[in-house]
Amino acid sequence: MSQHIAVFGYGAVGQAVVDIALKQGHSVSVAQRSAPAILPAGATFVLCDVLDGEAVMRAADGASQIIVAIGFRYDSSTWKACWPRAMANLIEASAVHGARMIFIDNLYMYGPQSRPLKEDMPLSDFGVKPAVRSEVTRLWMAAAEAGRARITALRAPDFYGPRVGLSHIGDVGFGAVANGRAATLIVQPDMPHAFAYVPDIGRAVGTLLEAPDETYGQAWHVPCAPLLTPRHILELGAAAIGQKAKIRSVPLWMLPPAGLVSGFMREVAEMRFTFDRPYEVDSHKFARRFWGEATPFEIGAAETARSFVRTDAALAA
């Protein structure tokens, strides 16, 4: 049945979600602070700042489902100020309009772990950014448990995919390899690490859009391919475009001192527990209920590398 879907945020994940929703036959509006350069046929734009409750309410008007694919500057003070406020506005719009909500989330709220991440792990208040993600999780879970709104979270680790630049292995990884340059990584190149393929995130959202209400009020992990190291993933992409992957990385011990002079490196240093050990996501819950066949890295890395070659060729034309 055709519905109207309001998608908040139009980055790489938001674009994948819009494409899936349109393929499912829904009408789609994209809500954010500035109009995208291009929107696919069938999608419209709504000016909206998620920190403005009235604007969020207007953007969600008429929607039967809301998809939250927003992001804020990677800065702890910004996250503390913006995430709870944005989530409160989105929850209120969902409740008032009776629209189901899918929150595309990360995995920070679990804090440091030494085993695969599962949805039933307790929320952590370790560090600023994980504590903020825990706070917003408590907000939407409380609203769902109270019956105010039908909300679910789709959680994903670091992601990658065609034309995805803002990723640990995006512009600095696949983009560099496509240009014959050395990839420069902050993540440790030889540490196994989970990455979600953006088209798989879009597919998972599409699945939840059509899922019954009983699947809401809880969190789900998006299926990910079996663990590989960033080096191996980039080598797969390099081989697909006839390149040899050259990789350099920032040693973990350099992050804290680098953070003294670089705000971004300071923020990364707080999250080093996500890449100083094997980082694995358990998505068996989603697989048991829906599907679990994530795109293999052999396919995803190859297509991602080719997309950067195509993009560079288009820019040079």
Image: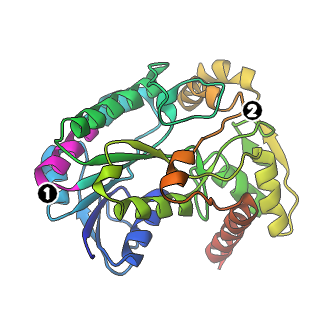
Mark 1 vs mark 2: give the one in front. Answer: 1
Please name the residue shown 59% across and 64% down the image. 163
Task: Check the image and report above or below for 210 versus 124.
Answer: below
Q: Amino acid at mark 1?
A: Arg
| Image spot of residue 24 (x, y percent) | 38, 75
Please name the residue shown 23% across and 42% down the image. 51
Q: Quadrant of the C terminus?
A: bottom right
Magenta-colored stretch includes residue 90: yes
- Secondary structure of the residue carrying numbered label 1: helix
| Image spot of residue 209 (x, y percent) | 35, 62
- Secondary structure of the residue carrying numbered label 2: loop
Magenta segment boundaries in residue numbering: 86-99
Is residue 32 found left or right of 163 in the rendered image?
Answer: left
Q: Label 1, on which residue? A: 58
Callout 1 environment at 10 Å: few (<14), some (14 to 19), or many (20+)? some
Q: Label 2, on which residue? A: 250
Please name the residue shown 81% across and 38% down the image. 190
Number of labels in the image equals 2
Q: Can residue 33 be seen?
A: no
Magenta span main SS: helix
Task: Check the image and report above or below for 78 versus 286.
Answer: above
| Image spot of residue 301 (x, y percent) | 72, 61
